[in-house]
Structures are given as C-alpha cells and as structure tokens.
Amino acid sequence: MLRLYLCAKKKTIEQPSEQEDEVVDLTDNEQNQAVEYLLVEDRNSESPKHFEINDGTSTSGQLELNDTLPWDGLLTVGESTDSDIVMFISGDDRLDVTVDESNLQTFPEKQDDAPHQAVDHSSVLAGDVPMSDVPAQTLPEPQSCPVTLIVRRGHCLTDLINAFKDPNITASEVNIKMRLPNGELEQGEGSGVLRDCLTEFWMDFYDSCTLGVEVKVPFIRHDFQFEEWQAVARIFVVGWKQGGYFPVKLALPFLEEVLYGSTTSSFKDSLLLYVSQQERSVLLKALEDFNSVDTDELLDVLDAHECKQVPTKDTLLPVLAQIGHKVIIQAPMYVIECWRPVVGSVADLLPPEGLHHFISQKKTTSKKVKELLNFPEEMTAAQSTVSRYLKRYIGEIDCNNLQLFLRFCTGSDLLDQAILIEFIETTDFLRRPQSHTCGCVLKLPIGYHSYPDFRSEFNNILTSSMWVMDVV
C-alpha cells in the first residue's frame, strides 16, 4: 500500500503500515504519473534492502545530478548499504522516497556477486510502452487496498479521469478528499464526500461530454481517446458499487446498449427528451395532427438532425425512431464499445427488465423528496413552523433546485438516502441551514420570522457556486 504526498517543493513517497491506505494527490498529475513506478519490490528478501537511483556517474545514496554531465533518462536501481532514501534532484525540486522495511517487497534474491539490477523505466515514465507490455518484475503487483484520491474542487472531471485510467483501481476501496482553490484540504471526509465528488463529476460530464436536453448522450471528442472513455466507465462502476451513484440522465436506449448489447426502449420517446423544448413541441404537434403543423417548421427541425426524407403522416413515426437510433446509438458507438467491457459487473447486478423502473425511481420530484424527510416525533411550535416552511419550499422549487437540495443534504442529487431533520438554535448573524452529508442530516435553525426569510437563505445556499465540506 502506498501513500503519496505531492507538494510544491518536496515530494515524498512512503510505504505505510497495512492499516493505512494509499493516498494519491491528483493536483499534480504529471509528477504523480512520473513517480508512481519508482518503488521497487523484492518478495523474498529477509534483510532490509535500500535502493538508490543511479545516473551512471555516481553511486552515492544521495544523488546530485551533475549539470555538466547530461543524464540519459534511464533509472538504475541498485542496493545500497549506507542509504535508506532514494533522492531525485532536479533544479530546486527534491523527491524523497522512504522505504518501510516491514512492508517492503522487492525483486527475488540475486547472486551475491551481482553488483546491482538495472531496470529501464524510461519508456514507462514517458508513456511510450503500454503497462501490459512491461515485464512483470519491474512493477508492483496490484493490490486490493483502500485508495484515497485528493481531488481539486471544480476539477473533478479531469482529476478523476486521470486517476481512473489505472484498471486496478476498480478492485480498490476509493475514498475522496477535496482540495479547495486556495490549496487547503477540506476537513470533510467519508461517504458523503465521495457522493458529492461523483455528483460534481457527472454534472461536469453532462455539460462537457454529452448532447441532449433532458436525456444525455456522449459525443465524440478529439481529446477523449480509448483511455479516457474507459476511465469514465470505471468511474461509472465504482460510483455505482461504492457510492450508490447512477448516471440516470443518460438516455435509456444508450444505457441498454452499453449494459446488455440490445435495446427495448422507444427511440422516439428518447428523441423527444433529447431535443429542445421548442423542437419537442413541433414534433408532438405533428404526431398528434400532422396536417395542423407548420411544414417549414417541421422540416427545419428534421433538417437540424440531418434527416434526408420529407415525412408524411404515415412515415413520421418511423422517421423519428430512425433519427433517435442515429443520435443515441450510432453516433456514440465508439463510446459504447469502450464502456461495454468495463461495465459488465453493473449489468450483472441490474437486470434489463428492472432498468427502466430503477431509473424512474431515482428521478427527483417534490413528492418523493418530501417522503425522504424524517422529522423528530415530537416538535415544539417553533420547530413545527420551520418544518412547514421546509415542505413548502420543496414544493415550490423546480427540478434543478430539488437536485441541488438533495446534494446539499446527502451529497448526491439522486433519491437515495432518507434525510434526518434536526433543529438548532443560533443567533440571527449565524443563522443558516447546515448539513452533514455522510449521515444525511439537515440542521435547521428555528429563528425564522417568516417563510420569505427561510426561502431567501436556502436559495442563497443552493445558488452558491461552491460548498465546502468542513465537518469530519
């Protein structure tokens, strides 16, 4: 198990005891990828082994790279009896790798007369050679251990994709720590932070990597290749298994094709949710009464989706189904092929006949959110007043704000967790709703003088650009 700290000036890799988990700071992805293979393992060693990086000009335990001698970029790993620290110095930055002998695993024993064993990591570090082509003895064996990812708030999409490019991460228990824009780590941790990070990831994914209005379909991006799309699929799997998060906004036929290799849902219905509200109204009017619709308006809508046929009353329905198949299945087929080998475990847990019901149950409505509220059995008059304010507020806000309300209370914008309501007493200056996402607890002050005061404070919270998880 590995703990990785990345700092501005000093970077340390240490191998902790078995009770600790691996910590990966994603705020410096290039350095992270460049150092993750510097740890060398020896399974059969009974005596402590110390390793150093040798540039071919020095064998000291503390290696100073001579600026007058060009380094060939090859890392030589050898045994040293006078140093237990691997040092790699470049400019002002210094990288320390501290080895914990109690957990050290290294190469098999070599002959006594062998001065050292050299391993060329340069091609791995540069990304020129796939991980599968690297000899097994040069890399640590994958272990199913907890992994803590340090993710920048506001950059969940890129940070998680970089972390989940490693196929072995699906076998690990993933925890999340969030780093604020000022560089500090949030105090919050646990399942609520994981759900919040997954929610932010999929919101960014919908905005940056999909097309569609009420349902979303991934589109091909030049900067998303095979590795990136498979990383998204691994986030799908880990998010569903460990965080209970499912991307319900993805079009149902797309999900069926990814998970089961065939579709049973209506492409026409999905297309109507995929297009804009104005286009939807034109298409619905044409389906209800073809002769009453403006022909030019209908043709403009169909032309926007590259329809090459002038429809009639009898052919409009199959034409819409064909367009739906094109935009939902044919256009993202490369994404489907990338995801399909990864998400098989989700398909095993979620049978095809239950997918539609499962997604419909996850979608947010005011009635369903009110049913999640768990108030104290006995409440004072002031507490009862605030509880009525909360129910009224939930009934008035739109679907987007309902999802924000759920995320504020539980970390997830899906209908997953019951919300425990607690009442607190505060001054007017400190008065604001509070939440603990790990326990799905919403704390409400009881000092509101009117419903508009309550609505105004909750609106300010939900429209805030960033929430800080400051409760451990």
Image (spheres, rainbow, N blue to C red):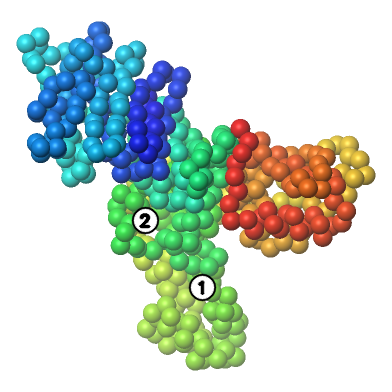
Tell me residue 203's x, y (percent): 52, 56
Tell me residue 15's x, y (percent): 36, 22
> In the rendered image, which quarter contains the N terminus?
top left
Look at the numbered disc 1 and give the secondary structure of its residue. loop
Q: Which mark is residue 204?
A: none
Name which residue lies at 13% across and 21% down: 59
Residue to which mark 2 is pinned: 336
Name which residue lies at 50% across and 86% down: 298
Q: In the displayed structure, does residue 471 sit left or right of residue 182? A: right
Q: In the displayed structure, does residue 93 sit left or right of residue 150? A: left
Residue 159 in view (yes/no)? yes
Looking at the picture, which amino acid does disc 1 mark? Val
Count residues near mark 2 (Cα–Cα under 10 Å), then give few for <14, some for 14-19, many for 20+: many
Q: CA distance from mark 2 to mark 1?
A: 21 Å
> In the rendered image, which quarter contains the C terminus?
top right
Q: Is residue 14 above or below residue 261?
A: above
Residue to which mark 1 is pinned: 275
Tell me residue 230's x, y (percent): 35, 48
Look at the numbered disc 2 and give the secondary structure of its residue. helix
